[in-house]
């Protein structure tokens, strides 16, 4: 029939089967072009923010996040977490996990010698973000007046804000606790 055609599929493939994990009906995996998502049709890249190139990975889903221990050509590990709701990547740590399992809502990672529960209570988590460079070519020469951050922080959390101006070193600007409100 004339209304029937066979679409050409891309040549994107998974380079490590251990990186495949399903999250909310979407398959995520590591390809030679970075991390990809496949929801039917064409796979699309979700890792444009990541600058490193990875050769292998082991991954798992916790129902909201895609968690991957990725290895570069030197064998260095980076544990990366992809938040599918906000399309953001976070560096979790550098533990060389060789496998993961999601067991009754908790994610466990195995190294060559130990087993860890990820995101367990009492664990100290360091997290940061850096905005793009704000120059004369940015936002019609406007400066950055304020930053709004929504954070669900536990008691005794310390929030440190650093600022860098004119390519100088980052300087501590403010230290906050969850009970304080930045004005």
Image: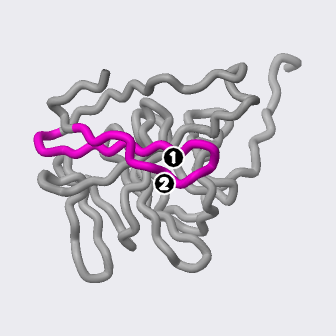
Residue 7: % across, % down: 79, 33
Disc 1 crowd, CA 10 A, few/some/many (<14, 14-19, 20+): many
In this picture, which residue range is highlighted in magenta? 154-176
Question: Measuring 70% from the left and 28% from the top, which residue is drawn there?
Answer: 138
Q: Is residue 75 left or right of residue 79?
A: right
Observer-nearest of 92 and 180: 180
Q: Is mark 1 on a helix, strand or loop?
A: strand
| Outermost residue toward the right in this view | 2
Q: Do the residues labelled 1 and 2 touch (CB within 8 Å)?
A: yes
Does 169 appear in magenta?
Answer: yes
Instruction: Kindly identify which numbered label has been placed on residue 28.
Output: 1
Name above or below for residue 147 compared with residue 29.
Answer: above
Q: What element carries label 2?
A: loop
Q: In this view, does 115 lie to the left or right of 1?
A: left
Residue 164: % across, % down: 53, 45
Which quarter of the figure has residue 84?
A: top left
Quarter of the image with the C terminus is top left
Residue 176: % across, % down: 24, 38
The residue tagged 2 is 20
Question: Measuring 35% from the left and 67% from the top, which residue is drawn there?
Answer: 99
């Amino acid at each position: 029939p004339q209304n029937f055609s066979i679409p050409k599929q891309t040549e994107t493939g998974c380079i490590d089967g251990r990186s495949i994990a399903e999250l909310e009906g979407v398959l995520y995996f590591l390809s030679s072009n970075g991390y990809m998502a496949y929801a039917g049709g064409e796979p699309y890249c979700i890792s444009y923010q990541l600058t490193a190139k990875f050769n292998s990975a082991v991954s798992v889903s916790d129902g909201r996040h895609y968690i991957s221990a990725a290895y570069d050509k030197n064998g260095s590990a980076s544990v990366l977490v992809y938040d599918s709701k906000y399309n953001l990547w976070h560096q979790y740590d550098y533990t060389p996990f060789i496998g993961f399992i999601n067991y009754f809502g908790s994610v466990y990672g195995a190294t060559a010698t130990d087993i860890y529960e990820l995101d367990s209570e009492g664990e100290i988590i360091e997290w940061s973000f850096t905005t793009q460079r704000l120059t004369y070519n940015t936002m019609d020469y406007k400066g950055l007046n304020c930053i709004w951050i929504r954070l669900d922080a536990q008691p005794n959390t310390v929030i440190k804000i650093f600022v860098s101006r004119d390519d100088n070193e980052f300087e501590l600007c403010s230290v906050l606790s969850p009970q304080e409100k930045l004005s």
